[in-house]
Image: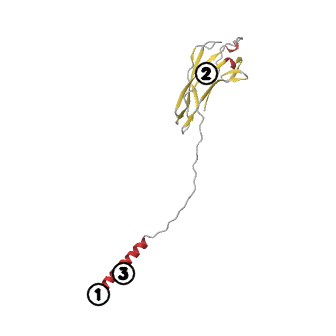
Amino acid sequence: MVRRLKSKRAITILGSILVLAIATTAYAYFTATGSGTGSASVGTASPFTVTFGATTGGPLLPGSGHQTLPYTVTNPGSGSQQLTTTTAAVASSGGFVTQSGAPASGCLAAWFTAENNPPAAVDLGPGDSTTGVVNVTMTDSGTNQDPCQGVAPDITVTAS
């Protein structure tokens, strides 16, 4: 009977070892690494749009009067864009102010000033806008400025 016990014990031990060996084998695996390269595309900035409101103030006369021209800068793009500054200038061609894009002969651009009151630098999200104001004046040159009578000088605002 002792012999039977030993052999049953031996069979049980051998069986346990065999089960452990199979279990260990079932968990064996290989490791590997790999890589690939794709790409993402970056969009481009959209030019800001500048629109003007209604001009207010009295008529421009040599040495007196001023007009205020409000403007709005809008980000028409699909991503955020930094508006750093705006500049304003009296539009001219050949030294003469332009009116609706055409030179007003004899009406010198040097007789006008466009003082810009820009908006603060701001990050504009898609569709966001901010506002500024341009004050326009006409200097007294001490000469005949009749060619400017009735002229509405173009004012250019550039946003960047």
What residue does disc 1 label? 4
Q: In the displayed structure, would residue 107 be above or below residue 128?
A: above
What residue does disc 2 label? 115
Residue drawn 33% across the image and 83% down it: 10
Give, as a three-letter code, the residue at label 3.
Leu
The CA distance from mark 3 to mark 2 is 99 Å
Residue 101 in picture, x, y percent from top left:
67, 24
Q: In the displayed structure, would residue 43 be above or below residue 155?
A: below
**Left or right: 157 as drawn, with respect to 93:** left
Choose top left, top right, bottom left or bottom right for residue 6: bottom left
User: Relative to the observer, which residue lies in front, 81 or 98?
Assistant: 81
| Quadrant (top left/top right/bottom left/bottom right) for the C terminus | top right
Q: Residues within 10 Å of mark 2 (few under 14, many from 20)?
A: some
The CA distance from mark 2 to mark 1 is 112 Å
Q: Sequence-wise, which precedes: disc 2 or disc 1?
A: 1
Give, as a three-letter code, the residue at label 1.
Arg
Q: Sequence-wise, which precedes: disc 3 or disc 2?
A: 3
